[in-house]
Amino acid sequence: MTALALPVPPPATLRRRASDLLYTRRGLLLMALLAPPLLWFGVIYLGSLFALLANAFFRLDDFTGQVVREVGFGNFVALLEAANLDAARRSVAMAIAVTLACTGLALPLAYYMARHARGTQKALLYIAVMLPLWSSYLVRLYAWKLLLAKEGAISWVAERLHATWVLDAVLSVPLIGGPSLSFSTLGTFIVFVYMWLPFMVLPVMAAIERIPASTLEASADLGARPARTLRHVILPLALPGIAAGSIFTFSLTLGDYIIPQVIGDSTLFIGQVVYRQQGVAGNLPFAAAFSLVPIVVIGIYLWLAKRQGAFDAL
Amino acid sequence: MRSEAGFGLRAAAWGVVLFMHVPMAMIVLYAFSAEDKSYVFPPPALTTQWFGVAWGRDDVWAAIELSFSVAVWSTAIALLLGTLAAAALARAKFFGRDVISLLLILPIALPGIVTGIALRSAYHTLEIPFSFWTIVIGHATFCVVVVFNNAVARLRRLSPNLIEASMDLGADGFQTVRYVVLPQLGSALLAGALLAFALSFDEVIVTTFTAGQQTTLPIWMLQELIRPRQRPVTNVVAVVIVALTFIPIVLAYTLTRSDEPAHR
């Protein structure tokens, strides 16, 4: 064995010196990497949010229809009107209900995909979850218009099963019912759940895949029945995935104005109020003020989700 | 743990899959429906005439073209910004790191209507006229996080030993990035880019606030939904898009799967 030969130090080209500089001065490297995204988000995104915030304090001149750039709190007083509070309350309740339903539906599918499906079947299931994400939101909404219509497929199936009375009974329930599924809050709820379900399935599946099989075996070896393993082992470990998925289901429901406009009764959700105020009424300041409501609600929600470790599971 | 799933679990899982796909089947069925006035089920007769009608519609082609170029530009910007942010945040610990990752998630965590009306307020305040680029700016902003998430997950799995080995063998930082980091990152970036593209191609809520007179494909659909002219044409376009997007998903899936062998 000969003595270890030290490698010849590479020639100090400009490129090598730049590389060494970035390697030894980590702060410089970080700054170089972060500058473009920070500029984009700092200037365009935060700038826009600031413009939104500023507009919320302005007011609309009733005669000229122009935005008057004077700071005032008129918009926030208007927020407290019964109709607006009602829209906010209804939206939050819907977002919570949709999130719970998505969790309930996503868990069995995600668990099956993560633990039981193999090979081709797993690939097919994965594609089956991804495919709706890829296809047009509006087409899928339209599909539900077809399904839920009075003369549509669901009524037809109910009729064939001699269960039209069940459908009528459900539709006659106050608050969630209506003349037909496509004009009821129940219909709005079904479509919301359908739309955001893939956003819940994928992170929950990822979280369940990360649970080592030995943990579940240990639980069984220690005498836990499947239901108990589910409650005390799987659910707690899947919680970051559920929290991550719920960020999407909650926030997407809270901000959507198209689904309740196409499927549902005439009661308004936050998104519809905002859209109408800035569009039909041309009242950008009030729309801006009202859109701060979901920001505050979601801020609280994100804070709670972060405590559950949701961002590590995204 | 039993390796065979119980009947209840299997039934529940496939039931949910069915719930996710029956509506899609409806769209395919109705694309062949001869009835164009009502939603009656089952369709009274089947026809293929609407495919020819849709093919001849210039407004459909224009909308597809606009959506495609918006998605390409948004994806390109998101790839650049998302990868840079991921490289900076994957391992380094510094003050304000959590704030930055929160900032990246915010456009998608906040409802689209907030991002939309915020951009509209900004354009209104600065008196920027609506254009192709006002749409792209909005889309790119919420696409960054998708690329970022994919890249950051892969970078965290990438062993630092590989980078050190590369440096020990005499490569400089740029060579290490080019020959060691990027090949490892490739499929994650591709997956992120495909998701970003899909997100942009399908986006309607932010777009309604930032588009002015421009008609992207989703805005075209929305107009058809609110004031339908020929419903079957919408169905045909939808079927074609579902069919076209099926190929890239399968591709992306097999690509990202093949380079993670035995990792489960």
Image: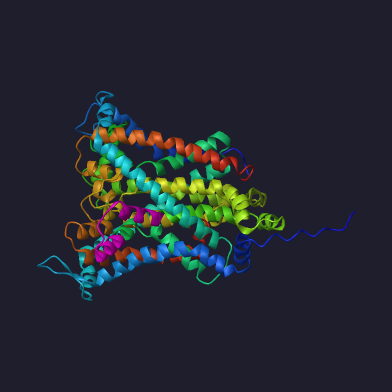
Residue drawn at 28 percent across, 30 percent down: B55
For the stretch drawn in magenta, the main secondary structure is: helix
Q: Quick one: which residue is furthest to the left in this view?
A: A63
Taking depth in this image into account, of B121 and B165 the one nearest to the observer is B165
Residue A135 at least partly seen? yes
Q: How is the image coloured?
A: rainbow
Question: Where is residue A96 shown, x and y percent of the image?
Answer: 37, 57
Taking depth in this image into account, of A58 and B137 the one nearest to the observer is B137
Say if B134 sits above or below B8 in the image: below
Residue A137 at least partly seen? no
Q: Quick one: which residue is furthest to the right in this view?
A: A1
What residue range appears in magenta? B117-142
Residue drawn at 63 percent across, 54 percent down: B176
Quarter residue B68 falls in: top left
For the image, the number of numbered tags is 0
Quarter residue B103 falls in: bottom left
Question: Where is residue B203 shown, x and y percent of the image?
Answer: 34, 49
Reply yes or no: does residue B119 show up in magenta: yes
Question: Where is residue A246 shown, x and y percent of the image?
Answer: 43, 55
Taking depth in this image into account, of B48 and B24 the one nearest to the observer is B48
Left/right placement of residue A90 relative to residue A179 reads: right
Question: Where is residue B264 shown, x and y percent of the image?
Answer: 61, 45
Say if B50 sits above or below A147 in the image: above
Quarter residue A60 falls in: bottom left
Left/right placement of residue B191 relative to residue A88 reads: right
Reply yes or no: does residue A276 show up in magenta: no
